[in-house]
Image (cartoon, rainbow, N blue to C red):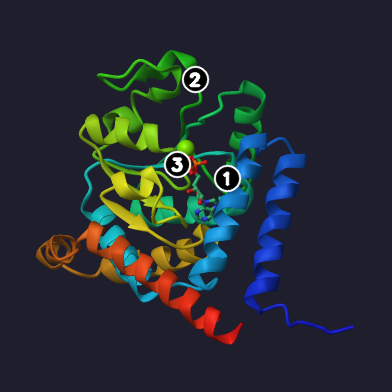
């Protein structure tokens, strides 16, 4: 039997998959969330299962953007609650961003399970909990655009990891600055967000926490310049070139 070290990217990917399956068994993850994971795994494979240079610069821009925000909110869905609840709570504490449970496939029982998970990981205040606080993003009609009036509705910057394209567009139309984590640089979410971190959220979130700690020391002007210098379309193109190069290299080996 060949023993692959635990730090090997392939092994790490399998451990991430296990976390998601456990999250499904605990009632956190929707069936559709398993499919999203599969799509993510395919792209993770293509990007080489590591954080690219382009992703690192998107993480920097994201940290600057969150720190400059007046009312930042991190949107939590089932996959995120299964994969990295502790890290999201930590990010929210470090950056004073609110946490909102916001589900694409709405289900009260699942929502309760996600809230419990966030609380057991240290979350104090969670938005998106009470129906009486909910409202719709302007100009949209679907039930999936329901948000908390004190959370995403009032936010200027929204972090939406592993989000759907329609909802990302709805957030942009509502005037929000959108930051996402999405392994697929071609997804509608990736193409619609202001800042797309093309990396596995489980790898990138720790880097974002570290970066926001470092950036908290910097002045407003420096942060504004980091955002002004960031071009999401260019960054996505760099990620696509990276995939192409990885494929070319593999094709040579095969
Ligand atoms: P879109 O609606 O934006 O066009 P989609 O319909 O292909 O995308 P969704 O299920 O709506 O996909 O969104 C989930 C996204 O999250 C996918 O693009 C998938 O690649 C990505 N994803 C899944 N797991 C992870 C992960 N662990 N880290 C980062 N991204 C992930
Ligand atoms: Mg979608």
Mark toward the start of the polypeptide (1 vs 2): 1
Q: Tell me the residue at 30%/28% (across/down).
A: 153
| Distance Cα–Cα, label 1 vs label 2 | 27 Å
* Quadrant that contains the N terminus: bottom right
Residue projecting furthest to the right: 1
* Quadrant that contains the C terminus: bottom right
Q: Which residue is mark 1?
A: 36
Residue 216 location in percent, x, y? 27, 65
Q: Is mark 1 within 8 Å of ligand 1?
A: yes
Position of residue 108 relative to residue 243, above or below, is: above
| Distance Cα–Cα, label 3 vs label 1 | 10 Å
Tag 1 secondary structure: helix
Mark 1 or mark 2, which is nearer to you? 1
Q: Which residue is mark 3?
A: 163
Mark toward the start of the polypeptide (3 vs 2): 2
Tag 3 secondary structure: loop
Q: Tell me the residue at 34%/64% (across/down).
A: 59
Q: Which residue is mark 2?
A: 130
Q: Is residue 170 visible?
A: yes
Mark 3 or mark 1, which is nearer to you? 1
Residue projecting furthest to the left: 221
Position of residue 27 relative to residue 4, above or below, is: above
The crowding category of the residue bearing disc 2, from other C-alpha atoms within 10 Å (few below 14, some 14 to 19, many at least 20), is few
Q: Is mark 3 within 8 Å of ligand 1?
A: yes
Q: Is residue 251 left or right of residue 185?
A: right
């Amino acid at each position: 039997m060949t023993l692959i070290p635990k730090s090997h990217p392939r092994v790490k990917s399998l451990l991430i998959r296990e976390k998601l399956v456990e999250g499904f068994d605990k009632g956190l993850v929707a069936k559709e969330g398993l499919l999203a994971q599969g799509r993510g795994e395919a792209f993770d494979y293509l990007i080489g299962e590591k954080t690219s240079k382009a992703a690192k610069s998107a993480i920097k821009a994201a940290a600057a953007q969150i720190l400059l925000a007046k009312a930042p909110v991190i949107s939590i869905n089932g996959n995120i609650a299964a994969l990295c609840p502790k890290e999201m709570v930590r990010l929210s504490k470090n950056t004073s961003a609110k946490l909102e449970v916001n589900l694409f496939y709405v289900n009260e029982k699942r929502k309760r399970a996600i809230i419990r998970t966030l609380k057991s990981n240290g979350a104090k205040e969670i938005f998106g909990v009470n129906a009486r606080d909910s409202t719709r993003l302007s100009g949209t009609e679907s039930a999936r655009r329901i948000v908390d009036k004190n959370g995403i509705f009032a936010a200027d910057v929204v972090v939406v990891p592993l989000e759907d394209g329609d909802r990302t567009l709805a957030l942009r139309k509502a005037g929000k600055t959108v930051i996402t984590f999405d392994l697929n640089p071609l997804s509608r979410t990736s193409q619609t967000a202001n800042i797309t971190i093309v990396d596995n959220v489980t790898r990138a979130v720790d880097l974002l926490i570290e970066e926001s700690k470092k950036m908290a020391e910097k002045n407003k002007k420096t942060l504004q310049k980091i955002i002004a210098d960031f071009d999401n379309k260019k960054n996505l193109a760099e990620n696509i070139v990276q995939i192409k190069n990885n494929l070319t290299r593999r094709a040579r080996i095969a």
